[in-house]
Image (tube, rainbow, N blue to C red):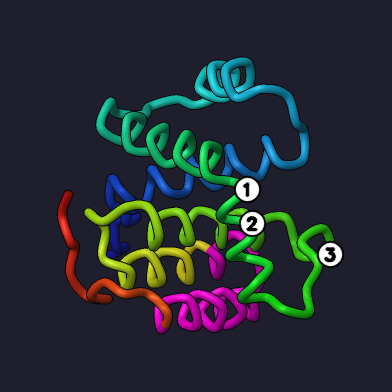
Amino acid sequence: MEKPVKHPGKRRHARELAIQFLYQFDLGGGTLDESLPLFWQTQTDITDPVRVFAEDLIRGCATHRETIDVQLRKYTEHWELPRMAAVDRNILRLAIYEMTCRDDIPPVVSINEAVEIAKRYSTHESGAFVNGILDRLRGDLTRPARTASGK
């Protein structure tokens, strides 16, 4: 008997959509207000909660991108951002946004999600790369790693 195909949870699905958009936006440029509606036109069977969470993540990453990239440069030391694989760069941006700007998401959740998404959309080695960078950031956070702080 075949096992049914397991679909990702709503938040994982939203994160995957956010990564897809951020990747496309990173490489294609344009404005967020122009690019986002076009992105949603290409997506099918997206529930409202998934879209709302994904768009919140996308807008948060875009708003805080400059600060996120400063953090990313700090923790990647010898990697210039343009040399990093675009998918890895955007997975890291999303996780850094969650870890530094979203008190409602425990940092370990952001790390675990980023590692799993990296393994799925990039290379197996990307999972370890992403984990190493985000674990260094987690060590410098002043909030609990395993619980949401709330707002």
Q: Which residue is drawn at 17% across and 69% down?
A: 147
Highlighted magenta segment, given as a residue range? 118-139
Query: Can you say whether 9 is above or below 108 in the image?
Result: above
32 or 46: nearer the viewer: 32
**Residue at 62 percent of width and 48 percent of height:** 66
Distance from Cα at disc 3 to Cα at disc 1: 17 Å
Q: Give the residue drawn at x 50%, y 82%.
A: 136
The circle on residue 83 is 3
Q: Which of marks 3 and 1 is in front?
A: 1
Q: Which mark is residue 69?
A: 2
At label 1, which amino acid type do we have?
Glu
Relative vertical location of residue 136 with respect to residue 113 in this rendering, above or below? below
Tell which of 126 and 77 is nearer to you: 77
Q: Sequence order check: which comes first, mark 2 or mark 3?
A: 2
Provide the secondary structure element on which disc 2 rests. helix
**Residue, disc 1:** 66
Measured as percent of width and height from the top left, residue 127 is found at 56, 76
Residue in front for this viewpoint, 68 or 6: 68
Question: Is residue 126 rendered magenta in the image?
Answer: yes
Q: Distance between the residues labelled 2 and 3?
A: 14 Å
Q: From the viewer's perspective, is residue 23 above or below residue 73?
A: above
Q: Determine the main secondary structure of the stretch shown in magenta.
A: helix
